[in-house]
Image (cartoon, rainbow, N blue to C red):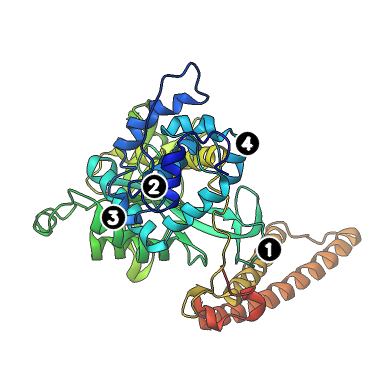
């Protein structure tokens, strides 16, 4: 039984007997109507982006009727047709879909899964993806000069394993899932993604996974001699949100690699005078032009040995709010700094678009494998103690503000009525003082505990209740 729409009987029999090394030939015939035929218009763009470049060298060669390039073209066309997984292919006629590939019919779901499994060796896929990423950067070196980095959580609702929980901002909940750190260019196009089953945080991922790869792959970086001659030049610029705010990290990236960073200032000082701002025309990476009121100063960001002089750029909004940006991109023009920082929305649009149209939140793996015992994870005790510290600090601040208000408006005794009020005021004041001393002692204790608690521990050191089942 060859199945419905199988018209190339001889080729299929030869493939089944192992006598057809090159697989099915691609043949297009005249048709009056081809459902979803418009995807063929995107074929030049797919090939131009390197879809079939060196695929057999990276992914290997499939045997049988359907070859490696057949499967990759089918998956690409499925994406363009918004068919988000193999199961949804059942809803489309295999014969009609086969016409898009120049074949008699597209493979059935079971066959497609078998072929994809044969190509999806982790090292092979990583090698192919890395090669594509390098090609894209070499084709557009200017786009690779400024990169946006952000994490996106793929929520897992299955029951095969218990993945670590993490906060999902779009859901406003802590859910089990995997964090993907995407590296996109200024218009939101992705270069590559780093998957973290156990999330060590943005800064750790940048330092250990993303920056070393970018130092190797980004083309046209200034030489060591050029960097030595120009003390303000950098290799490339990383842009991320407030999660990456760390003066120590900024200093390390600059001193060690001459990599510039850019983010929002987490602790800006008082507002700048309004006459410091002037209207500037900003050209966004997409080409759109907008008018912003901007001002710039040099600022010492951080404390102690980690303090570093950076550029601080502020944008004045119509409501009077001042949005502060800090960066070590010393050579970048003022308008370019604000244009690139405020273009971070393009990456958020990429996440939203890919989620709704291509299902990037759907886990494509059905198997499980054990996690390494040496994998570093955030210490849950440290998180718990930080929560306690924040709670105590909040309670202390509330009582300090009440105490200050009572001191500013004391009760003065003039008659019997004021005398009663004064005694009541004095009693409340004494109670507040006692509570303030209590919370100050608690805060001191929890801070001492925090200073002795390691921020990261290995997976082996994690308690069983925090591990789930130790698989991903």
Among the two numbered marks 2 and 3 on one chain, the one whose residue lies closer to the N terminus: 3
Residue 52 in view (yes/no) = yes
Say whether marks 2 and 1 touch (CB < 8 Å). no
Element type at mark 4: helix
Nearer to me, 244 or 78? 78
Name the mark nearer the viewer: 2 or 4.
Answer: 2
Q: Which residue is mark 4?
A: 91
The quadrant holding residue 433 is bottom right
Give the tally of numbered discs.
4
Element type at mark 2: loop
Few, some or many residues within 10 Å of mark 3 (<14, 14–19, 20+): few
Element type at mark 1: loop
Q: Say which quadrant the C terminus sits in.
A: bottom right
From the top left corner, tell me how far across and down residue 344 is, in percent. Answer: 43, 42
Residue furthest to the top in view is 32
Q: Which residue is mark 3?
A: 57
Residue 310 in view (yes/no) = no
Say whether marks 2 and 4 touch (CB < 8 Å). no
Q: Is residue 134 left or right of residue 372?
A: left
Whole-number angstrom distance, CA of label 3 to CA of label 1: 36 Å
Residue 159's disc is 1
From the top left corner, tell me how far across and down residue 440 is, in percent. Answer: 64, 75
Name the mark nearer the viewer: 3 or 1.
Answer: 3
Residue 67's disc is 2
Among the two numbered marks 2 and 4 on one chain, the one whose residue lies closer to the N terminus: 2
């Amino acid at each position: 039984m060859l199945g419905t729409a199988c018209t190339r009987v001889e080729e299929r029999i030869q493939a089944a007997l192992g006598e057809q090394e090159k697989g099915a030939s691609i043949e297009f015939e005249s048709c009056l109507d081809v459902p979803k035929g418009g995807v063929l218009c995107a074929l030049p763009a797919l090939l131009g982006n390197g879809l079939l470049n060196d695929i057999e060298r990276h992914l290997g060669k499939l045997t049988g009727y359907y070859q490696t390039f057949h499967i990759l073209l089918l998956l690409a066309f499925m994406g363009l047709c918004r068919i988000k997984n193999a199961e949804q292919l059942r809803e489309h006629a295999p014969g009609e879909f086969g016409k898009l590939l120049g074949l008699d019919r597209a493979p059935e779901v079971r066959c497609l899964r078998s072929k994809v499994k044969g190509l999806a060796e982790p090292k092979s896929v990583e090698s192919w993806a890395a090669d594509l990423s390098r090609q894209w950067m070499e084709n557009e070196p200017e786009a690779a000069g400024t990169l946006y980095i952000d994490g996106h959580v793929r929520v897992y609702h299955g029951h095969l394993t218990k993945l670590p929980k993490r906060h999902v901002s779009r859901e406003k909940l802590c859910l089990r899932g995997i964090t993907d750190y995407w590296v996109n260019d200024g218009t939101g196009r992705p270069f590559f993604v780093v998957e973290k089953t156990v999330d060590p945080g943005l800064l750790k991922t940048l330092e250990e996974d993303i920056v070393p790869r970018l130092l190797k792959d980004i083309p046209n970086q200034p030489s060591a001699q050029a960097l030595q001659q120009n003390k303000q030049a950098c290799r490339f610029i990383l842009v991320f949100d407030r999660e990456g705010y760390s003066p120590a990290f900024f200093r390390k990236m600059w001193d060690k690699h001459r990599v510039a960073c850019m983010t929002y200032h987490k602790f800006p000082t008082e507002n700048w005078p309004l006459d410091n701002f002037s209207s500037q025309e900003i050209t966004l990476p997409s080409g759109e032009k907008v008018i912003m009121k901007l001002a710039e100063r040099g600022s010492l960001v951080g404390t102690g040995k980690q303090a570093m002089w950076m550029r601080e750029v502020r944008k004045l909004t119509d409501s009077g709010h001042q949005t502060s940006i800090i960066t070590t991109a010393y050579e970048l023009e003022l308008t370019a700094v604000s244009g690139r920082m405020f273009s971070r929305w393009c990456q958020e649009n990429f996440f939203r678009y890919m989620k709704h149209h291509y299902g990037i939140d759907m886990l494509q793996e059905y198997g499980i494998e054990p996690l390494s015992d040496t994998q570093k994870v955030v210490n849950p005790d440290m998180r718990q103690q930080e929560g306690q510290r924040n709670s105590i600090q909040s309670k202390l601040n509330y009582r300090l503000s009440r105490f200050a208000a009572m001191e500013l408006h004391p009760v003065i005794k003039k008659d019997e009525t004021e005398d009663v009020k004064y005694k009541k005021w004095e009693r409340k004041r004494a109670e507040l003082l006692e509570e303030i001393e209590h919370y100050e002692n608690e805060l001191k204790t929890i801070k001492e505990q925090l200073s002795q608690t390691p921020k990261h521990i290995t997976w082996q050191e994690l308690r069983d209740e925090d591990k789930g089942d130790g698989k991903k």
